[in-house]
Image (cartoon, rainbow, N blue to C red):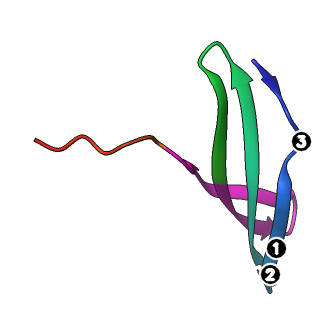
Amino acid sequence: MSTAPTTHPAVVAAGDLAVLSFQFVSQGSEGQRRWNTTEAYRRDPERGWRIVHTHWSLTDAGPAVVG
């Protein structure tokens, strides 16, 4: 899988917590896919910033299947 750079990064920080969100484009055998990504970080006094939660979702998952 090849990837494109991330786009639209945004960070909100408060004390020892921070949230990073960005858009990501992947290119693989299924074609190009666009993702929204959110990662939560906590600052550890001894180890620095660590990811404590991450979430990825497709920005266009295609038509909904009902039934």
Q: Name the image quarter holding residue 13.
A: bottom right
Q: Name the image quarter holding residue 7.
A: bottom right
Q: Mark on residue 47?
A: none
Q: Rate crowding at label 3 as few (under 14), some (14 to 19) or many (20 or more) other CA atoms within 10 Å.
A: few
Labelled pair 1, 2 in contact (Cβ < 8 Å):
yes
**Residue 35 location (% of width, % of height):** 64, 46
Side of 2 relative to 36 (left or right): right
Foreground tag (3 vs 2): 3
Instruction: Decide which of 60, 17 is in the foreground and name it.
Output: 60
Q: Residue furthest front?
A: 63
Q: CA distance from mark 3 to mark 1?
A: 17 Å
Name the residue: 75% across, 45% down: 24
Amino acid found under the numbered disc labelled 2:
Ala
Disc 1 marks which residue? Answer: 11
Disc 2 marks which residue? Answer: 13
Q: CA distance from mark 1 to mark 2?
A: 6 Å
Q: Residue furthest bottom?
A: 14
Side of 25 relative to 35 (left or right): right
Disc 3 marks which residue? Answer: 5
Q: Which residues are magenta?
A: 37-60
The relative height of residue 24 versus residue 38 in the rendered view (above or below) is above
**Residue 37 location (% of width, % of height):** 66, 54
Task: Please state, as top left, top right, bottom left or bottom right, where the C terminus lies in the image.
Answer: top left
